Image (tube, helix red, strand yellow):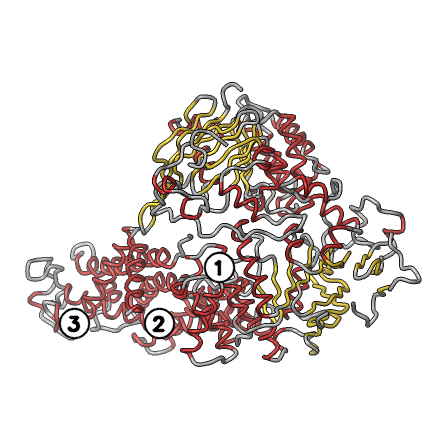
Amino acid sequence: MGEPVLRIDDLHVSFRVYEGTLQVLDGVALRVDRGQRVGLVGEAGCGKTTTMRCVLRILQSPPGRITAGAIRYRGKDLLRASQGELQRIRGSGISMIFQDPVAALNPVFTVGDQLSAVIRHGTHRRLTRGEIRRRALAALREVQLPDPDRLFASYPVQLSGGMRQRVCIAMALATEPEVMIADEPTTALDVTIQAQVLRLLDRLVQEHETAVIFITHSLGVVREMADWVYVMYAGTIVEGAETDELFERPLHPYTLGLLSALPKLTGGGIAEGIPGRIPDYLHPPSGCRFSPRCPSAVAACHRDRPVWMQVRRDPDHAVACHLYPKGEA
Amino acid sequence: MSREILIVDGLRKFFVTSRGTVRAVDRVSFSVRAGETLGLVGESGSGKSTVAYTVIGLHAPTSGRIVFDGHDMSTSIWKRPRALKRAIQIVFQDPGTSLNPRRTVQQILELPLRVHRVGTPRERRDRSIELLRKVELPEDYLYKAPHMLGGGERQMVAIARALATDPRLILLDEPTSALDVSIQAKIIHMLLRFQREMDLAYLFITHDLSLMRNVATRVAIMYLGRICETAPTEEFFRNPLHPYTQMLLSSIPVVSKEEEAIRPARIISKGEIPSPVHVPPGCGFHTRCMVCATACSAEEPVMVEVEDGHFVSCLHFPPASDALPRAAESEEVF
Amino acid sequence: MRLGKRRWEGFRKAWYKFSRNPVSVVGLVFVLGVSFLAVFAPLVSPYPHHAGPYVNFAIGSKPPSASHPFGTDAFGRDILSRVFFGFRYSLMMGAVVLGLVVIPGVVLGLIAGYYQGTRIDTVIMRITDIFLAVPPLILALAITSVLTPSVFNAMMAVSLMWWPWYTRLVYGLASSLRHEFFVQSAEVIGASRFHILFRELLPNCVSAIFTKMSLDMGWVILIGSALSFVGLGAQPPIPDLGTMVADGAKYLPDQWWIAIFPAFAIMITVLGFNLLGDGFRDLFALEEI
């Protein structure tokens, strides 16, 4: 397996608000290997976007604060890196695609301008204008956008949602990053367009051998796109496994709850959903954060934080749950 | 079979803009029966939201008829009688903006009661509390402002508001698209329970076919302002006929092998959805259709009943002499 | 009881939001200070009678001293006391003008914005455009020079060219808000247009309106002072700050205190309202969950 290209250890983040301090992330840990496609699944408010913002150090800093932990990119701790080092890494080492292509592209610059800026910034040697333009056009062709020359001169507002997202993908891949973070890349798109874009993304990351972190709340998308899935709840990672393994043999009660609440194409009704609400980050529950809502909770769950344990090997499967104390399934 | 509570016949809604005429809804006909859910499926540009907004009266129809419970209401909301406004309600897509951020939940829930002059102020407050209890929210939420609530809770308040006047029909425009799976499950269960208890009819609009499968009694699928196919739910999913239906079904990401098995084989669409300003001639779908024939770019298809209750609008299903053809301007409705 | 407790909690939260920016608190202090002095001028001024027709050339043009911290002017009047009374006229100018202007301006803006695209919109906004096209100070000068110069006429003149700004502001807000789902919900429910304008749209404009009002206080005071400076506003012996600056200007730089202290007083007042305006913006911001 080798050294992971990105590794997050014991990340703790808090947010200061009127009522007090929100303990948003409580010991998040995950790893991404070279060329691996990792899915990070969780519902709104679980902290997945916050985690990714910490990686690129774009967390809004007041009110957010990283209180503990390390994020290692190729061994280097990004949380202790200098601004200069971060500038070099952003874009060419680690790049990001955001959820809303409308907001991610600057409306007053042409597609060509924005793509060129990314290429120029991300390449360490000086390139001529001609070279930059050539690379930009190549990037546009790679994401299967028709008529790249005309698109180069167009403004984002002239493009449809799917086309804009392809431009964002082109920008994220143009500098051959080692890690790409895709934050809900297709949520804003229509289903048939989503299928096209996901297929494209899949092909491109395989070709470029880029590691990808897919953040999404859609279990269906993550099943199609990821090799490995982490399930996140209330600022903690509760389960992680190879994709097929997670969907066929889910272990954590939260994962089970999510999967059963999902409407199935085969019909049969949907389960009631998980009772209760996400915890109050001001006064998070002691012990396991899911324990107040968990149908299988025992006394230990309310008292002690569960430890991340490998439950199965080949296919790999790990879980943080008192129901599996010694790694037994 | 219960009676038809909403009948839409030949509905058209065009918008004239500087870029041209947007044919948002183009000769759409359907009906909803009391106590049942008609699912309306489509992607962007399909016109499904415009259908809802026209039925509720936010737009006046360009032509066509809307008949509710025997009353003709083919006009904008301002011209409709007050009693009709009580009977049909709508829940919008975005919980973030469907509640006035500067009002409290109490004010929001009491608005329909005040407008329709229900009870004394004391009684209205009690009714608001009762509505909150119905959507399983605590009483002290009355004093909260929408921004203090999560997306799911806001949507529950929007639903409570829709229930305030004891409506007969509720239009739900993507009510759970912006919400998480577990909250969606809770809301759907609530909606289905209300339907049983209050004999409500729903016009349920969504792009999520998996959700539709579990919620709708009948499904209609729209593309570029026209209905492509309509069928009872089971039949719709077991035997999708229209190429667009098949394409849509094949594109949905699913989470289990069983679902993969019943899904049509993967059809990757080419190209973008055309804009409703430039609807392609003939069959609107022909530019992306995998079984497009020469006639498709010239001739408009006609709605045909292929099996009992299963209607398709596609040139590959021509009207046969023993089938029930659905001609464009006929007065009949199904 | 519950209502009282909720109101108190709301007030505490409002103070928290407002006071997070210390500069806004400074503005509030300035405004409260000036207001206090204005209201209680007769009680806190060392020489309240100097605010009227008083002459004592024996103590005229004396520099700042223990008995006259701001010095005396050419007529021997205590400048400190006159500044306190001067605050009265400045604040009154601001309060009267805004009091006259905000309600009609906002109502017109709401109506024009809600009916955007119709003839009502065109009529209201074109009239607004005409008023906005004239440079404000010039219009005020023209009006006051035609009528008899006085504080009252200055206020009328400024009011007449101030209302369109509120209409414009609210028009922009209302015309975009009317497409929001919550407005459409109210329409679908059957609410009256009155309700939609004043109970749905207006509360969402309040933040912008209050912020603008606070900043406008500063502007109105400045324009009022400018009119007085050129002799078209308050007439002597009324202790208007602008008039005081005008009178004192001729004695610069030797008897600097006659002009500088009133000018400084204008500055503190305007600055206070500007900073307060920023604070209002923070105060009305909705915190996201």
Q: Residue at the location (12% across, 63% down)?
A: C72
> The residue marked by circle 1 belongs to what chain?
B
Q: Nearer the viewer, residue B27 or B35?
A: B35
Is residue C128 shown left or right of residue C158? right
Position of A175 relative to B232 (above/below)? above
Q: CA distance from mark 1 to mark 2?
A: 41 Å
Position of B16 relative to C195 (above/below)? above
Are the residues flagged by discs 3 and 1 in contact, CB closer than 8 Å? no
Mark 2 or mark 3: which comes first in sequence? Answer: 3
Q: Secondary structure at mark 3?
A: helix
> The residue marked by circle 3 belongs to what chain?
C
Position of the C terminus of chain B, as image quadrant, is bottom right
Is residue A260 shown left or right of residue B265? left
Residue corresponding to mark 1? B154
Position of the N terminus of chain B, as image quadrant, is bottom right
Q: CA distance from mark 2 to mark 3?
A: 23 Å
Q: Position of residue C125 (x, y in %)?
A: 53, 69
Q: Nearer the viewer, mark 1 or mark 2?
A: 1
Q: Secondary structure at mark 2?
A: helix
Q: CA distance from mark 3 to mark 1?
A: 59 Å
Residue corresponding to mark 2? C97
Q: Position of residue A7 (x, y in %)?
A: 46, 27
Position of B62 relative to B96 (above/below)? below
Residue corresponding to mark 3? C51
Q: Residue at the location (18% across, 66% down)?
A: C37
